[in-house]
Image (spheres, rainbow, N blue to C red):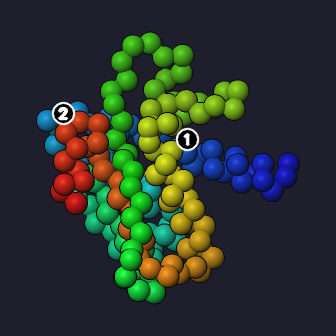
């Protein structure tokens, strides 16, 4: 197996873990426990980035600042980690994280734990190498995008 194939398998396993964690947002439900568990998983999966970042939890939504050499002209990367309820019949469970025929199945695989994973994975690899950004990089991931959208306002 090549180095690239090994890396791709590691990436798939990381994204599977994010998909397997149920983060359905429900209108009017203000219980943030599942989102806080998701934040803990992110911290486990991306330890170097979290170690170098200032992290705040806003009622289940996440704000991180990776300090750069200066705070002028910061970069903002946004996503959300909530998903819609899984109704109907599924050929793969909505939180299975199954991989079949090169496809990853589950809520969040397209909308949008995948983009959250991509930006955090890239930053994690850079942080592990000792990289320090020129300007601050802010990461925002909300838990209410699929319902009332209040997460971004709260942050």
Residue shown at 37% from the left, 46% from the top? 81
Label 1, residues with CA under 10 Å away: few <14, some 14-19, many ≥20: many
Foreground residue among 130 and 33: 130
Q: Secondary structure at mark 2?
A: loop
Q: Position of residue 103 (x, y in %)?
A: 63, 31
Residue closer to the observer: 41 or 119: 119
Determine the CA span between mark 1 and mark 2. Answer: 26 Å
Residue, disc 2: 27
Q: Is residue 23 above or below residue 56?
A: above
In the displayed structure image, the side of residue 89 where residue 13 appears, left or right: right
Which residue is most to the bottom?
69
Where is residue 139, by image quadrant?
Answer: bottom left
Q: Check disc 1 and report the residue beneath it.
A: 16
- Classify mark 2: residues with Cα within 10 Å, few (<14), some (14-19) or many (20+): few
Residue at x 44%, y 79% (from the top left corner): 135
Query: Of all residues shown, which one is farthest toward the top?
Result: 89
Task: Count the marks.
Answer: 2
Query: Is 71 located above or below residue 53 in the figure?
Result: below
| Residue 2 appears left or right of 148 | right
Please tell me which residue lies in front, 37 or 58.
58
Q: Residue at x 22, y 44 (%)?
A: 149
Q: Quadrant of residue 76?
A: bottom left
Q: Residue at 51% across / 78% down in the picture?
A: 133
Q: Position of residue 104 (x, y in %)?
A: 59, 33
Question: Foreground mark, 1 or 2?
Answer: 2
């Amino acid at each position: 197996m090549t180095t690239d194939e090994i890396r791709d398998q590691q990436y798939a396993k990381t994204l599977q873990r994010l998909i397997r964690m149920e983060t359905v947002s429900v209108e009017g439900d203000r219980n943030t426990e599942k989102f806080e568990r998701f934040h803990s998983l992110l911290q486990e999966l991306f330890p170097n980035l979290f170690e170098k970042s200032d992290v705040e939890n806003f009622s289940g939504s996440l704000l991180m600042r990776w300090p750069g050499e200066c705070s002028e002209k910061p970069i903002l990367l946004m996503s959300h980690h909530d998903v819609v309820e899984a109704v109907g019949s599924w050929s793969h469970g909505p939180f299975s994280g199954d991989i079949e025929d090169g496809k990853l199945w589950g809520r969040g695989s397209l909308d949008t734990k995948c983009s959250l994973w991509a930006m955090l994975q890239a930053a994690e690899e850079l942080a592990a190498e000792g990289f320090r950004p020129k300007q601050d990089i802010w990461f925002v991931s909300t838990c209410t995008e699929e319902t009332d959208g209040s997460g971004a306002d709260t942050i």
